[in-house]
Image (cartoon, rainbow, N blue to C red):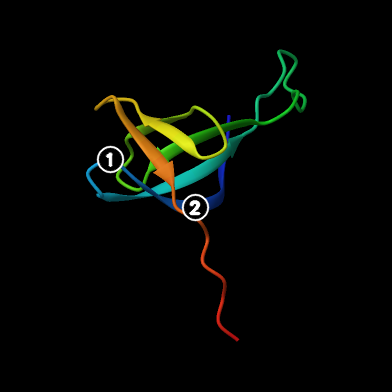
Amino acid sequence: MAAVLVGQFHARDAEGRVYSVHEFQESMPSADGEAGSEPVTTYRLAIGDRVKKLDDNQFLLVQADVTLVREPESPVNQ
């Protein structure tokens, strides 16, 4: 199983602390060693703590049982 970083974003808890969340896609090989089905998306903090996706903008920091809300992406200045 190989995990590839496919994105990252910031999320904030209820007390205003900001967390850097990394999004990974993990390939799941089949039993015969060939390419498996759909990749599985997982989330982790930059420090490695597991994060569970609740919906498009809400995540749960598993070890601390803290809900995080995804920060909106700011537009790039041109």
Name the foreground residue: 30 vs 44: 44
Classify residue 39 by image quadrant: top right
Q: Mark 1 against mark 2, which lies toward the viewer? A: 1
Which residue in the rendered view is the most extreme toward the front? Answer: 14
Q: In the drawing, what numbered circle is on residue 8?
A: 2
The residue drawn where x is 29% and y is 45% is: 47
Q: Residue at x 41, y 38 (%)?
A: 44
Position of the N terminus by quadrant: top right
Q: Position of residue 61 (x, y in %)?
A: 34, 31
Q: Which residue is mark 1?
A: 14
- Amino acid on which the number 2 mark rests in the picture: Gln
Q: Nearer the viewer, residue 3 or 12?
A: 12
Q: Disc 1, disc 2: CB below 8 Å? A: no
Examine the image and state in which quarter residue 13 appears: top left
Image quarter of the C terminus: bottom right
Q: Residue at point 41% right, 42% down?
A: 69
Q: Is residue 31 left or right of residue 60?
A: right
Q: With respect to residue 38, does 14 lie above or below?
A: below
Q: Within 10 angstroms of label 2, few (less than 14), some, or many (20 or more) residues?
A: some
